[in-house]
Amino acid sequence: MKTSRFLKAASLAVLFLGLVVFGPDSVLAGNMFREQALFLAHIPLGGGQFFTTNYIFTSTEGPGSINLKCFNDAFQRIGPPAGVNVPLPATGTVAQHTPTTLGVTADPLFASGAGWCFADTIVGSNDFNSQITVGVTTDLTVGGILNSPSATFIGHNTGLGETSRLFGGDTFFTTANGALHFLVLVNPYTTTTTLQLQLFDVTGNQQGSTISRTLNGRAFVSLLVPAAWGLATPPTSGNVRITGANTVGQGWLGWYLQVYPNGRAVFNSLGLDGDTIDQIPPAAAP
């Protein structure tokens, strides 16, 4: 995929996408839990191509059923009001979905094509695993990103079952040779939270001022790094440090997306501060 097409996608999504932080201990961004946050995208690029997401859910502890409710980039509910139920009737059961099968692509509130979903166990208390695949494809059937020989720009990640009340960090970004780096921060709770973001070059010198981003309940913010800092001469590589309010029960999470000029991409979740992590509680379920 050409860089210009991705820029078009970002523009259509209101400077959308990205991902927060691949921190020093990414295992803390756990994927197997009863409640998980999932990255969501479905952006037309022209020529029948879409930057989109596919999902795989697997029952790892026994039978159960999960419910998915999705939100757009303006923290509005999208898709069926009751969400979409995904039955997992036995250990090892696999279910696959797309934005279309989740009912969000037909929702006029999903015009930006960017958002997130909350997956919540509704039958039983067993945990489940999830896999998020992002890519560019003309095949919008279930599993189309991986099944289509023409699909490009493919990356994988998992749903997040934990949030951080304090630190997170985007370990490395680069814009060399036209590479793009995006950061997405999600607030899965109903109350508002504010994050402070600091930009550093690779030698540890802070670049520009600390910027703030407020996340309303169920909302996310997206940043193009380092452009979000508005510097006349931004560093071509470096990292981002993110600081929350350290309020118990009010965490945040997210993903980052590093896109290279050759079309390859790194798609990963943030590393959470192990001292201030919280599981997304059942009470936070939409």
Image (cartoon, grey):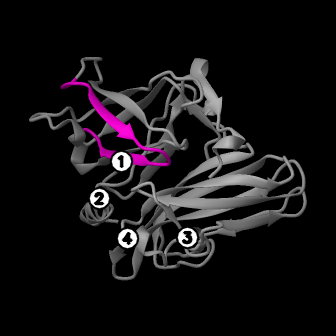
* Position of the N terminus by quadrant: bottom left
Tag 3 residue: 79
10 Å crowding of disc 2: few (<14), some (14-19), many (20+): some
**Label 2 residue SS:** loop
Tag 2 residue: 14
Residue furthest to the front in view is 191
Mark positioned earlier in the residue sequence (3 or 2): 2
Which amino acid type is shown beneath numbered disc 4? Answer: Ala
Q: Horizontal placement of 118 versus 139: left or right? A: right
Q: Which mark is residue 258?
A: none
Tag 4 residue: 111
**In front: 94, or 284?**
284
Highlighted magenta segment, given as a residue range: 207-226
Find the distance from the CA under tag 4 to the CA under tag 2: 10 Å
Tag 1 residue: 222
Mark positioned earlier in the residue sequence (1 or 2): 2
Which amino acid type is shown beneath numbered disc 1? Answer: Ser
**In front: 277, or 29?**
277
Q: Nearer the viewer, mark 3 or mark 2?
A: 3
Residue furthest to the left in view is 232
Q: Horizontal placement of 234 versus 239: left or right? A: left
Q: Looking at the image, how many numbered discs can be counted on the residues?
A: 4
For image coordinates 43% across by 52% down, the residue present is: 265
